[in-house]
Amino acid sequence: MGFVFIDDRLVEDSKAVISVFDHGLVAGDGVFEALAVYGGTPFAVRRHLERLARSAAGLRLEPPNLTVIEAAIHQVAEANKIGFGKVRVTYTAGDGPLGSDRLVSPPRVIVAGAPLGPIPPTARVSISPWPRSERGILAGIKTTSYAENVVGLDWARAQGSSEVIFPNLAGMLCEGSGSNIFVVIEGSLVTPPLSSGCLAGVTRDLIIEFLGGIEADVPLDKVTSGDLSEAFLSSSLREAQAISHFDDFAMPVAPGPVSLNIAERFRELIKDNLNP
């Protein structure tokens, strides 16, 4: 038996229900965050809540009550006895009509969690044939409108990969379905800038801020040109996961020295401060 927080209380997951008119369900009108949990403690709560607030503002939603949500995150992690795993916060516009219009309705807060097994040290990725729009109204916002990611990831799994990488309309690397990407070019650690349309990932930001790395556009053709000596994915749960293949193109080494160094230093960051 697990527990889920909905609106203002913790309930058994078997009894957790929402309205069929919830606008997050009807129209994808919501935002979310997924936090890693280590030893029962959610990681980087402050940064995730700050991004939740930015995403809500980008979707023109009522500002979330971050104090209530922070307490709920810890309640769910504790109630579900999560050692290593994740907690997901979903914040929707609340009940609405069966269309794109919104009603004046209280927003809905859902916090759920689950334990996870170990994450593999490397990942095979596939380059999406569908580009991400860096000019779209939802670019850079972590919304529940995730069908594009679902389809892209399902396609990538059919190719034998565990993640899909989207280019943008300009032909530059953008991001994965649930991750950011870093590459090593001539010894420099590079990740696409936010102007590429990628999400400002919490792990991405921590790596740039504490461990190094620069933001720069990376043309898609760099992937198979031999210019990349290493590449890795970053996300709350992957941390820094080396990329072994881009489709059938094998990286020279995976994980390489830069990826290993970043992964080790990131784990040290987690041990030193669970809320950086």
Image (spheres, rainbow, N blue to C red):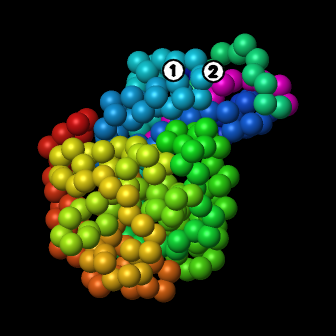
The relative height of residue 243 versus residue 175 in the rendered view (above or below) is: below
| x and y, in percent, of residue 148 in the image | 65, 55
| x and y, in percent, of residue 63 in the image | 52, 18
Q: Is residue 37 left or right of residue 146?
A: left
- Name the image quarter holding the C terminus: top left
Choose the circle earlier in sequence order: 1 or 2. 1
Under mark 1, the amino acid is: Pro
Residue 96 circle label: none
* Magenta span of residues: 87-98
Q: Which residue was labeled with disc 2?
A: 107
In this orientation, which residue lies closer to the viewer: 29 or 271? 29
Q: What secondary structure is found at the residue carrying circle 1?
A: loop
Q: Is residue 6 left or right of residue 241?
A: right
For residue 182, what is the image quadrant?
bottom left
| x and y, in percent, of residue 43 in the image | 31, 41
Q: Which residue was labeled with disc 1?
A: 64
Residue at (20%, 64%) from the top-left corner? 188
Q: What secondary structure is found at the residue carrying circle 2?
A: loop
Under mark 2, the amino acid is: Pro
The relative height of residue 149 versus residue 101 in the rendered view (above or below) is: below
| x and y, in percent, of residue 69 in the image | 46, 25
For residue 129, what is the image quadrant?
bottom right
Q: CA distance from mark 1 to mark 2?
A: 8 Å
Question: Is residue 18 in view?
Answer: yes
